[in-house]
Image (cartoon, helix red, strand yellow):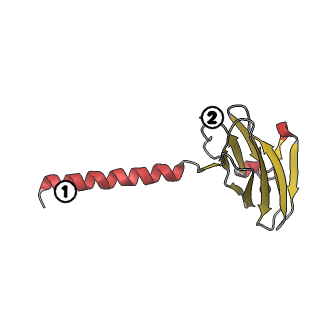
């Protein structure tokens, strides 16, 4: 193996590594276009998926399942949603995607711990997690 071949190999390895690193740092976005219902997991202390990409005005029923033994909530003040989700319980909430940009949702007990997410439309980009 000559020296230029080794250099090419080293360059491609470092490219692969930086690609994987940036993918891991970027929040995962779930495309929910055309869906009427979605299962959302609430756990300690996150929602999964947390970033939902839909279409303007789209209504989506979220079946929020609390898989932990801690009380959580699903809260969107501007949509008058504030649902407590007891440990091991499942609650259904209907959310509406905004005409543009993002709507922020969170657990009112644990938002300071980063238990939150966004309903996104258009080319909105997810805010980096806290
Ligand atoms: Cu919580």
Closer-to-camera residue (35/96): 35
Count of marks overlaid on the render: 2
Closer-to-camera residue (75/59): 59
Q: Circle 1 — which element?
A: helix
Q: Is residue 125 left or right of residue 118?
A: left
Per the image, the residue denoted by label 2 is: 122
Location of residue 30 in the rendering, given as x and y in whole percent from the top left corner = 62, 50
Q: Residues within 10 Å of mark 1 (few under 14, many from 20)?
A: few
Give the quadrant of the N terminus.
bottom left
Q: Is residue 108 left or right of residue 35?
A: right
Quarter of the image for residue 64 reads: bottom right
* The quarter of the picture showing ligand 1: bottom right
- Name the outermost residue toward the front: 34
The residue under the point 29% across, 53% down is: 12
Vertically, is 72 above or below 101?
A: below
User: Which marked residue is nearer to the observer: mark 1 or mark 2?
Assistant: 2
Q: CA distance from mark 1 to mark 2?
A: 44 Å
Q: Residues within 10 Å of mark 2 (few under 14, many from 20)?
A: some
The residue under the point 40% across, 50% down is: 18
Mark 1 and mark 2 lie on one chain; the one further toward the N terminus is 1
- Name the outermost residue toward the left: 2
Closer-to-camera residue (130/64): 64
Location of residue 15 in the rendering, given as x and y in whole percent from the top left corner = 34, 50
The residue under the point 87% across, 55% down is: 84
Per the image, the residue denoted by label 1 is: 6
Q: Is residue 13 left or right of residue 88?
A: left
Closer-to-camera residue (22/124): 124
């Amino acid at each position: 193996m000559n020296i230029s071949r080794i250099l090419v190999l080293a360059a491609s390895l470092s490219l692969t590594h930086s690609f994987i690193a940036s993918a891991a740092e970027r929040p995962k976005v779930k495309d929910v276009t055309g869906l009427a219902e979605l299962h959302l997991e609430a756990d300690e202390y996150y929602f999964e998926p947390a970033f939902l990409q839909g279409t303007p005005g789209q209504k989506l029923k979220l079946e929020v399942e609390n898989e932990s033994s801690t009380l959580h909530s699903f809260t969107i003040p501007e949509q008058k949603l504030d649902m407590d989700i007891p440990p091991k319980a499942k609650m259904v909430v209907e959310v509406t995607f905004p005409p543009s940009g993002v709507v922020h949702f969170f657990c009112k007990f644990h938002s300071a711990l980063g238990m939150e997410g966004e309903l996104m439309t258009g080319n909105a980009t997810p805010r980096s997690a806290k």
